[in-house]
Amino acid sequence: MADLIWFIAVAIGPLMLGAAIAYAMLRQRRLSAREKHEQNDAVRHLYENGRR
């Protein structure tokens, strides 16, 4: 029984972690040109006005 638990922890655990990371990377989308522009404007606004 202990051998099975170690097998799962050592062999299957990293595979599941890798699959989760790959899935997250595939689901991430890039910003459109408009969204990038809006993001840059918002960051510029924050730097100019400082924190509240």
Image: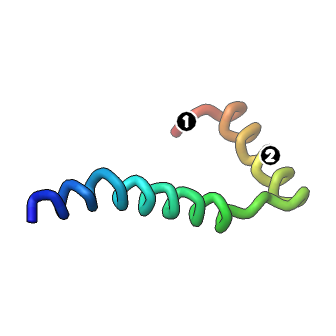
Q: Nearer the viewer, residue 7 or 28?
A: 7
* Quadrant position of the N terminus in the picture: bottom left
Mark whose residue sits in front, 1 or 2: 2
Q: Position of residue 27 (x, y in %)?
A: 65, 67
Query: Among all residues in the image, which is located at the extreme right?
Result: 33
What colour scheme was applied to this rendering of the protein? rainbow
Query: Among all residues in the image, which is located at the extreme left?
Result: 1
Q: Nearer the viewer, residue 42 or 18?
A: 18
Residue drawn at (26%, 55%) of the image: 9
Q: Which mark is residue 27?
A: none
Is residue 2 shown left or right of residue 44? Answer: left
Q: Amino acid at mark 2?
A: Asp
Q: Quadrant of residue 15?
A: bottom left
Is residue 37 shown left or right of residue 50? Answer: right
Residue drawn at (71%, 41%) of the image: 43
Q: Position of residue 42 (x, y in %)?
A: 73, 47
Q: Is residue 48 above or below residue 25?
A: above
Residue beneath disc 2: 41
Q: Which mark is residue 51?
A: 1
Element type at marker 1? Answer: loop
